[in-house]
């Protein structure tokens, strides 16, 4: 009799889905800059879109470690498909679960789960990214309504979204609003020509005197950055940390396979020690990254107070090793590594984006350094 738990079964089935459906088509999604509807429907059918949420709220009830394993399986095969799960489950779903009003959860969670509605998270603007507290998108209160003006940029899946979580400011007060796409005054344009995440339907969204009812505020006025955006980014970073593991592992699989097949000087290139060095380093880095993510997942699972900073550390580390491993994977492939006939070319591009999204590596370093100075700087044992 199998001892496989239901969570292990979800991950095993995700691996089969990734192998049979996603991986063979991922290159086409990238080339066509488009994630087809049948993929979104299939993710919805499998309840992957809100995988980390409780079953009662339309999720799969995966604990953080298994949500990580799911992210890895999907992310190995297709970065944009993984991106849709990151946005729906980690950024939108978890944020609504934590801070949404009862009516907001009732209205949005089940439609998000079954793919009937798509959500997108709109924080970054043309002129404001890392310094997110400086958002220029503004709102004013008019009676029981709010009027929104401004422009958001780089909104993943904004082109497909039925609603956005928009972070906006009224002088120093920052508030998060649910803004439905069909409100008057919204213009959405698809951002094309991206380095990677090409099938993630990135958009620039302009809000011109968009009227929003009071009940669309998430949390309270003024809680938009400290509570709402912070929660979204914490969950988003956890998912991106696993995306780094996914890309590194996929690149490692490719380079090891290639090194066992490709010949030079009459020998398999995997017999050359300089190639072995790259493969040995890739194995070590990928294993270390996954171990760190599992540890962080366990901390998140038990509500450890250091889980958020450890998530930041994991996101910083795995995005860096994904870049290193994919660089070596391209190198092992030689000229073929520079061709989109081989997946390492796409993985190399996708890895770079991980050092930028959900906070750049530099901002993670600053946060981690601040923590390090506070935690370790006081000891007098040396
Ligand atoms: C593919 C993709 C998908 C995205 N999806 C979304 C999304 O769904 N929703 C959303 O809101 N945003 C999204 N973004 C935006 C992303 O979060 C921002 O690009 C990121 O936060 C960086 O902001 P910026 O591009 O404005 O860079 P800037 O803030 O202009 O930074 C430029 C450079 O300066 C560095 N820098 C800035 N401040 C400091 C400092 N204090 N010390 C040291 N260095 C510093 C940065 O690290 C970076 O290297 C996405 C971006 C991409 C590329």
Image (cartoon, grey):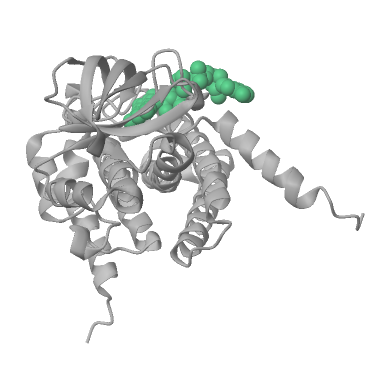
Say which residue appears at 56% left-offset and 52% top-offset.
310
Image position, residue 86 (x, y; %): 31, 43
Q: Is residue 287 left or right of residue 169?
A: right
**In the foreground, 357 or 251:** 357
The quadrant the N terminus occupies is: bottom left
290, above or below 226, in the image: below
159, above or below 354, in the image: above
Image position, residue 154 (x, y; %): 33, 22
Residue sitting at the far bottom: 1
**In the foreground, 81 or 51:** 51
Residue 280 appears in view: no
Residue 251 occupies quadrant: top left
227, above or below 197, in the image: below
Say which residue appears at 28% left-offset and 48% top-offset.
93
Image position, residue 229 (x, y; %): 42, 37
Residue 81 appears in view: yes
Say which residue appears at 13% left-offset and 40% top-offset.
117
Count numbered badges in the picture.
0
Image position, residue 180 (x, y; %): 17, 30
305, above or below 178, in the image: below
Say which residue appears at 16% left-offset and 26% top-offset.
181
Q: Is residue 95 left or right of residue 238?
A: left
């Amino acid at each position: 009799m199998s001892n496989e738990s239901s969570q292990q079964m979800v991950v095993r089935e995700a691996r089969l889905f990734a192998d049979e459906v996603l991986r063979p088509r991922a290159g086409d999604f990238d080339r066509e800059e488009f994630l087809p509807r049948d993929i979104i429907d299939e993710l919805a059918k499998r309840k992957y879109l809100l995988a980390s949420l409780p079953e009662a709220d339309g999720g799969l009830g995966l604990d953080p470690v298994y949500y990580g394993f799911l992210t890895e399986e999907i992310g190995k095969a297709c970065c944009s498909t993984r991106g849709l799960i990151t946005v729906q489950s980690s950024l939108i779903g978890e944020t609504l679960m934590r801070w949404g009003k009862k009516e907001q959860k009732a209205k949005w969670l089940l439609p998000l789960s079954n793919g009937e509605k798509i959500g997108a998270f709109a924080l970054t603007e043309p002129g404001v990214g890392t310094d997110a507290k400086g958002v220029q998108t503004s709102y004013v209160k008019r009676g029981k309504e709010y009027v929104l003006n401004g422009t958001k940029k780089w909104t993943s899946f904004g082109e497909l979204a039925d609603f956005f979580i928009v972070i906006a400011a009224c002088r120093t007060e920052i508030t998060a609003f649910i803004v439905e796409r069909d409100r008057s005054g919204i213009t959405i344009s698809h951002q094309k020509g991206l380095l990677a995440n090409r099938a993630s339907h990135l958009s620039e969204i302009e809000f011109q005197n968009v009227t929003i009812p009071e009940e669309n505020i998430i949390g309270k006025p003024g809680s938009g950055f400290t509570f709402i955006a912070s929660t979204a980014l914490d969950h988003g970073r956890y998912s991106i940390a696993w995306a780094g593991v996914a890309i590194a592992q996929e690149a490692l699989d490719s380079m090891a396979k290639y090194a066992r097949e490709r010949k030079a000087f009459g020998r398999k290139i995997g017999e050359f020690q300089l190639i072995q060095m790259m493969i040995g380093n890739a194995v070590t880095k990928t294993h270390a990254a996954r171990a760190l993510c599992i540890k962080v997942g366990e901390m998140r699972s038990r509500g450890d107070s250091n889980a958020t900073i450890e998530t930041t550390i994991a996101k910083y580390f795995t995005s860096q090793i994904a870049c290193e491993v994919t660089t070596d994977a391209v190198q092992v492939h030689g000229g073929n590594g520079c061709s989109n006939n081989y997946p390492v070319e796409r993985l190399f591009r996708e890895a770079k984006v991980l050092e930028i999204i959900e906070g750049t590596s530099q901002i993670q370093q600053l946060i981690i350094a601040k923590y390090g100075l506070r935690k370790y700087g006081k000891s007098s044992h040396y």
